[in-house]
Each structure stands twice: as C-alpha cells, then as structure tokens.
Image (spheres, rainbow, N blue to C red):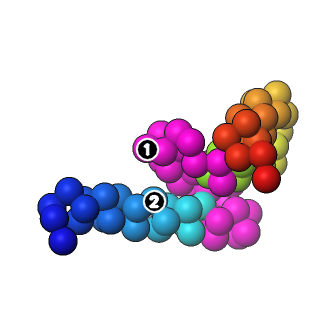
C-alpha cells in the first residue's frame, strides 16, 4: 500500500472512531463530549452529513435550536436521503 493510501486509510479509521465515540457519548447523555467528537469529524470532513446531523441533534439537546436547525439543513443539503 502506498504511503498516501495508508494515510488516507488511517484518517478514515480515526474519523470512524470519533463518530463511534460521538454516538456512544450521545447515548449515554454526555452531550458536550458528543458535540466535541462531532465537531472534530465535521472540521476534518465538512461534507460528512452524518456527523453534522448528529451534531444538530446534540445542539438541539443542548437547547440551541436555531443552530440545530441550521445544522439539520446543512446535513440535508449534503445528503437529502
């Protein structure tokens, strides 16, 4: 495997770990930790509709309804499915 492919593979694996962490924290009610993990993924992959959608759900849970709405819209614009 070329070095570039290996780096990409490692980044993808790290992103998956952060998403799994975000989901786990959310399910446990740790919204701030979930938010941090979602933000990390979204900052590194701004077109990750799942991470942005989960971040919207977390922000809604934190009472930030306007921000949640914007994030839901962004997520749906990326992937309307």
Magenta region, main secondary structure = helix
Rendered-image quadrant of the N terminus: bottom left
The x, y position of residue 55, in whole percent, is 68, 47
Q: Give yes or no for residue 73 being in the magenta stretch.
A: no
Q: Is residue 50 left or right of residue 7?
A: right
The residue depicted at 76 percent of the width and 41 percent of the height is: 76
Name the secondary structure under disc 2: helix
Name the secondary structure under disc 1: helix
Q: Give yes or no for residue 48 being in the magenta stretch.
A: yes
Considering only vertical position in the picture, is 69 above or below 7? above
Q: Residues within 10 Å of mark 1 (few under 14, many from 20)?
A: few
- Contact (Cβ within 8 Å) of mark 2 with mark 1: yes
> In which quadrant of the rendered view does residue 12 lie?
bottom left
Residues 45 and 54: in front is 45
Residues 80 and 51: in front is 80
Considering only vertical position in the picture, is 37 above or below 10? above
CA gap between label 2 and label 1 equals: 8 Å
Per the image, the residue denoted by label 1 is: 44
The residue lying furthest to the left in this view is 3
Task: Magenta stretch: give its range.
Answer: 23-50
Mark sitting on residue 56: none
Q: Earlier in the sequence, mark 2 or mark 1?
A: 2
Q: Is residue 40 left or right of residue 26?
A: left
Residue 62 visible, this orientation = no
Per the image, the residue denoted by label 2 is: 15
Residue 3 visible, this orientation = yes
């Amino acid at each position: 495997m070329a070095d570039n492919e290996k780096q990409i593979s490692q980044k993808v694996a790290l992103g998956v770990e952060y998403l799994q962490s975000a989901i786990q924290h959310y399910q446990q009610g740790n919204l701030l930790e979930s938010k941090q993990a979602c933000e990390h993924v979204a900052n590194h992959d701004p077109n990750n509709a799942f991470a942005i959608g989960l971040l919207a759900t977390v922000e809604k849970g934190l009472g930030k309804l306007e921000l949640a709405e914007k994030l839901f819209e962004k997520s749906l614009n990326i992937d309307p499915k």
